[in-house]
Image (cartoon, rainbow, N blue to C red):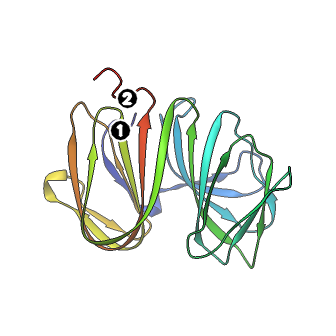
């Protein structure tokens, strides 16, 4: 699990090649950071039609952030189009899929998690006034600010979020409240360790 809650500014994302070498991604975070990760966040930069890397044992969800659309063409014949403003789709990392640009390059938010280890829920929400997030043992939250600006309450110790930044709200030994205020829109991702709460 992540050690501490923190904000990751957009200019600190790590740009790296896709696993198959056919594109670029900006990695936001991976947890744990060393060895085999349990969940990972990144922004894929798709500049040409290309096959996606395969990730056995991983599930993933893709959200269109920028561009005129992305078509996911699966080898078994299924086709899914991510249309603006924020089309999205979940699929298995084993799936053989090619990303086809509808009209020019796209940037796509990429949530990946290890099947059977964690489960996730991704929400797209407007930010109008205050929004509350609660972490607890085994339950983390991620907030990716799509547009606008926001700030966590002073007692959270996190500070400001600007468009494109990401906040990691780490699970701790007790239930913890995070209050976010501002205006814009965001992706909020609940990440729960499998088995969390079963022994409570």
| Residue shown at the point (50%, 56%) measured from the top left | 13
Q: Where, by quadrant of the figure, is residue 125 drawn?
A: bottom left
Nearer-the-camera pick, 24 or 42: 42
Q: Where is residue 122? Give x, y as percent.
A: 47, 54
| Residue shown at the point (46%, 63%) measured from the top left | 11
Q: Which residue is mark 2?
A: 196
| Residue shown at the point (20%, 48%) measured from the top left | 177
Quadrant for the C terminus, please: top left
Q: Where, by quadrant of the figure, is residue 45 drawn?
A: bottom right
Quadrant for the N terminus, please: top left
Task: Say whether marks 1 and 2 touch (CB < 8 Å).
Answer: yes
Helix, strand or loop at label 1? It is strand
Nearer-the-camera pick, 51 or 90: 90
Q: Where is residue 119? Give x, y as percent.
A: 49, 39
The residue lying furthest to the top in this view is 199
Helix, strand or loop at label 2? It is loop
Q: CA distance from mark 1 to mark 2?
A: 7 Å
Q: Which residue is mark 1?
A: 139
Is 152 placed left or right of 72 in the picture? left
Q: Count numbered badges in the picture.
A: 2
Q: Where is residue 178? Give x, y as percent.
A: 23, 52
């Amino acid at each position: 699990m992540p050690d501490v809650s923190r904000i990751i500014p957009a200019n600190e994302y790590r740009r790296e090649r896709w696993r198959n070498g056919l594109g670029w991604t900006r990695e936001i975070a991976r947890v744990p950071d060393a060895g085999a990760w349990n969940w990972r966040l990144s922004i894929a930069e798709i500049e040409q039609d290309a096959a996606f890397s395969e990730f056995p044992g991983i599930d993933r969800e893709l959200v269109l952030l920028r561009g005129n659309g992305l078509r996911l063409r699966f080898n078994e014949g299924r086709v899914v189009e991510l249309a603006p403003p924020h089309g999205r789709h979940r699929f298995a990392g084993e799936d053989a899929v090619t990303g086809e640009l509808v009209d020019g390059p796209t940037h796509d938010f990429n949530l990946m998690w290890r099947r059977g280890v964690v489960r996730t829920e991704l929400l797209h929400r407007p930010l109008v006034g205050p929004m509350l997030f609660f972490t607890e043992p085994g339950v983390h939250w991620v907030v990716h600010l799509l547009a606008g600006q926001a700030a966590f309450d002073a007692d959270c110790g996190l500070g400001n979020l600007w468009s494109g930044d990401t906040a990691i709200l780490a699970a701790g030994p007790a239930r913890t409240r995070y209050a976010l205020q501002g205006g814009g829109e965001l992706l909020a991702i609940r990440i729960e360790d499998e088995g969390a709460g079963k022994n409570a």
